[in-house]
Image (spheres, rainbow, N blue to C red):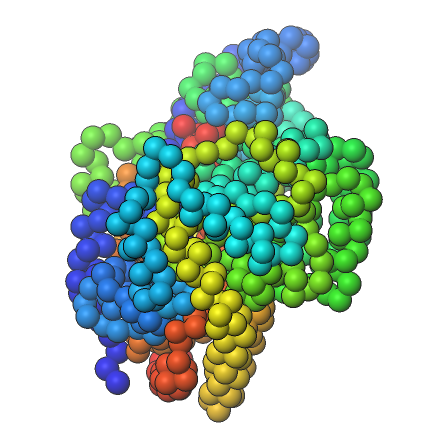
Amino acid sequence: MTCREVIPIHPITPMPHAGNPRLVRAILKNAPVCASFKLPAKACRHGLEGLSIMGVDQIKASLNLGAVLQNLAELCRLDPESQKLIRDWDVCVQFTVFAGPKAWVEFRGGECRTGLGTTALSDVHLVFVTPGHLNAMFAGSAIPPIPVKGFKRLGFLKNEFPRITARLEHYLKPGPGMLDDPAFLAANTTLTLHTAANALRELVKTEPTAGKIAAGTPTGRLQLAVGSDGPAAWVSFSPNGMEVGRGRLEHPDATMTFRDIPVAQGVLSGKEDGLAAIGRGEVVIWGMLPLIDSATLIMDRVERYLA
Amino acid sequence: MTPYEYPKSTELLARASKVIPGGIYGHFGPPPYVPVSAYPFWSDRAQGAHFWDVDGNRFIDYMCAYGPMILGYANPVVDAAYKAQMEQADSNSLCSPRMIELAELMVDMIPIADWAFFAKNGADMTNLAVMTARAATNRKKIIAIKGGYHGTTPWMQGPGHHGLTDDDLNHIIRIPFNDIVALERAISQYPNDVAGFISSPYHHPIFTDNELPAPGYWQQVQALLKKNGIVFIIDDVRAGFRVNLGGTCEQYGFKPDLIAFCKAIGNGYPISALVGTEALRNDVSKVFHTGSYWFSAGPMAAAIATLTELRRIDGPKILRETGEKLAKGMIDVAASHGYTIKVSGEPSMMYVRITDDPTLMLQQAWCGECTRRGAFFTSHHNWFVSTAHTDEDIQETLRICDEAFKAVKKTA
């Protein structure tokens, strides 16, 4: 029942020779950014038994794009400083992992929108040669992505975009004492809740065990919420795949309601014992409990990849 | 009546959560009790079909300690046998003759049994059954039923559960209950590699209607397993002695090779048993499987008394009649309020569901209201009745059901 940590997004440093076709070919040929190619095909590190490093990188990349990056939209909704930052931005950035996940983030009219897959509206298109390449960037690597579109916006990527990702990192990786500030705590919890919901979908898509858990889960929609008017997200299990969303459903099949922000933060961060919190009435569950059981089992797997 | 409140219970749970993981772990833990506020969690007194929580609230118990309590709490016959044995010896450096007497009794009562092996919990026996199947066949795969429960050893759990590796489930094949085609497919998918097939005698998962075997299902299974040299294991841990004293398989007319028992065998005293056919005697004797308390004589004496008493009073008949009275009464009460109750499984351990709300929220609210009025109902698991439940208990329970429906309607 934990989503203990989320990966910090580090500023993107555009490659000085971005767009150079020779360089792109060289990178694709040598794949120097992915040291994991050199490791044994089956690795048993980090408790990821049975998954190849390629498989682990693919899962991490899906989580980075599908769960962490997606939070920029929520960040811009709840953080006044972020709103100020993006007020005049007019750009859409496409992230593409070669033979891997894709996502985009758009800043227009003072708002931020994000999405999975590709958009025809991108002004900048960044390509990563492998999932490991993307993950390295999310982990702070200096090895840059390959811009294949929007060379004129490299200044934006170098100077402005990192400021919004820094805000996200500020909230998702709080320093000592920061969670004592109620407003900060609320923002951190909201972002963590949405990261957890999105991560659930990404794991079901990419991780074999999460897929098996989802396959054994009855069809239904689970509401995750804080109090009666706090942040809320939902996840939907069905044979056709998993969907997630923000906000409150009118008729969920199961609900998991955290009494307040501190309880939600404690449980979602793994600092508090979620089962004991249910016993104390701090977390209230109703309805089709198998949905909650499966969702929390899958969420608990996130830390294997984003720790 | 004024619904119960649980201040002391709540206080104890808070205290427990400081020193016990989750406050209470396992199937007694709070999560399935929805809403948690409707349930007590601590009790220190039980008698007959009733228990009292630490706040002094009295409950007619329809969980029966999740199955073990079949003759009622503190049954005088069983308790006397246990106490008498305890005065002689319990844990000892040598086995007690009670072990032979209990094995003889079980071999006498259970038609397929040529031997008996004792332990403490159901999982001890389902594990032994699977090891025996593998030892007997030199094969790896075990076919089990989707949603079937055989304990918490890693191979028995679902994917992704904490503490498991993917390897733990590598040799477990899950198929639907009552699906002979799926069984045929699984066997043909792993030719000469399936060691055993394990299932409860009827399907009693949680959160879902229970399912009795279709006519002819078990006979087809038995023939198919025999043809392919696969050991046939019945997990009768939950249903054992509640449906038929010869094992639930006798009720449905089939003969497995191994049957695991626990729960009702000792009326609450900790003991489990695996019984099996002559053909597997040598194989099971070669499997090294033991435990610190598996030779305790007290629970064996209690089990002898329990089984003897169940045979004397025809326990399964009483349980069936009690369950049927309760089920019919509840269905009628629900109908009088415009609701539909569906009862599935065997009457002695029925699964009850209000069909008007597929999310189970209505069911949870109603079970909670019943519990707060003194009928201890869970909303996720099959219930149990005991031979100690009286007609007065049933009538009182139906009055509670009626009040609970009124309360649910008022808050709906």
Quadrant the C terminus of chain B occupies: bottom left
- Which percent across, then down, holds residue B350? 52, 70
- Residue positioned 75% across, 52% down in the render: B222
Question: Which residue is drawn at the image coordinates 23% and 54% (left, top)?
Answer: B13
Above or below, B394 relative to A194: below
Q: Residue at x 22, y 39 (%)?
A: A179
Residue B292: give x, y in percent of width and height. 37, 35
Q: Nearer the viewer, residue A39 or B187?
A: B187
Residue B314 vs residue A261, the one in the foreground: B314
Residue A144 against residue B346 in the figure, above or below: above
Measuring from the top left, give residue A118's x and y in whole percent.
Answer: 63, 38
Name the residue located 21 percent from the left edge and 36 percent from the top edge. A178
- Residue A210 image point, x, y percent: 56, 40
A250 sits to left or right of B91: right
Residue B349 seen in render: no
Q: Nearer the viewer, residue A143 or A8?
A: A8
Q: Is residue B216 visible?
A: yes
Q: How many marks?
A: 0
Q: Quadrant of the N terminus of chain B?
A: bottom left
- B406 above or below B83? below
